[in-house]
Image (cartoon, rainbow, N blue to C red):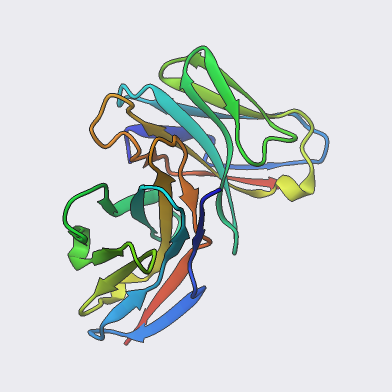
Amino acid sequence: DADVTQTPRNRITKTGKRIMLECSQTKGHDRMYWYRQDPGLGLRLIYYSFDVKDINKGEISDGYSVSRQAQAKFSLSLESAIPNQTALYFCATSDSYSSSYNEQFFGPGTRLTVL
Amino acid sequence: AQSVTQLDSQVPVFEEAPVELRCNYSSSVSVYLFWYVQYPNQGLQLLLKYLSGSTLVKGINGFEAEFNKSQTSFHLRKPSVHISDTAEYFCAVVTGGGNKLTFGTGTQLKVEL
């Protein structure tokens, strides 16, 4: 969905480096999410934010941190990247004011490789 | 805790044949159910959703799914598939009052000539 953008789209880095993945949305949604996708495991929730001052851990938050700089921006950081954080990362948004507030809209993904 | 099971990791099918991708969920409360599709090298796109009302839900690209509360299932079907349907399909659930999607592990649909 072009309304949710992620940068970079691809990134190769080395173990121990700090990495930031960025997500921006023009949908005006209040809720934002970060997932990682691994083959055979589906998507797992890392962090989610219901508004600028609300940040919550998902099921696999260890080794990650997030920042909600504005309603439209939600960044994911890997403070010290390790190889098992190699994955496809997705940002998503949803609108709590919508009648289908549980529907999430996904960005195109960031493929991260940690060597 | 809610969970989603997609029983088939891969489903090969010939073009123009029917297909069913299976999804079962575990929840004792009301649920909202979704099917997403991920085409190669792309993000996830919503195929269809069940929030309430009719148990037969129609989505994009000729797909449909039926919510079966007694079987706790939400299987995805298409009567005649096309090569362009080759993709990975994810079932997801939110329980009533909840805020988070729980995804299944995905089913890779491969349509062959």
Q: Would you say B41 lies left or right of A46 here?
A: left
Q: Is residue A92 left or right of residue B66?
A: right
Total residue callouts: 0
List x then y, in percent, for residue A49: 50, 24
The foreground one among A13 and A72 is: A72
Question: Quick one: quadrant of the N terminus of chain A?
Answer: top left
Q: Compared to B29, does A57 lie above or below?
A: above
Please indicate, yes or no, whether residue B87 appears anywhere in the rendered image: yes
Residue B31, given in percent of the width and then of the height, sits at: 36, 49
| Residue A115 visible within the image | no
Q: Is residue B8 above or below residue B94?
A: below
Name the residue at 23% across, 66% down: B63
Residue drawn where x is 40% and y is 77% of the image: B110
A92 or B101, nearer to the observer: B101
- Is residue B78 left or right of B34 when viewed as pictured? left
Tell me what residue is drawn at x 46 percent, y 22 percent. Answer: A50
The residue furthest right is: A16
**A60 sits left or right of A103 in the view:** right
Of residues B107 and A101, which is closer to you in this image?
A101
Identify the residue shown where x is 40% and y is 63%: B89
Could you tell me residue B48's position as x and y percent?
A: 26, 54
Task: From the viewer's side, name the closer residue of A111 and B20.
Answer: B20
Q: Position of residue B83 (x, y in %)?
A: 30, 76
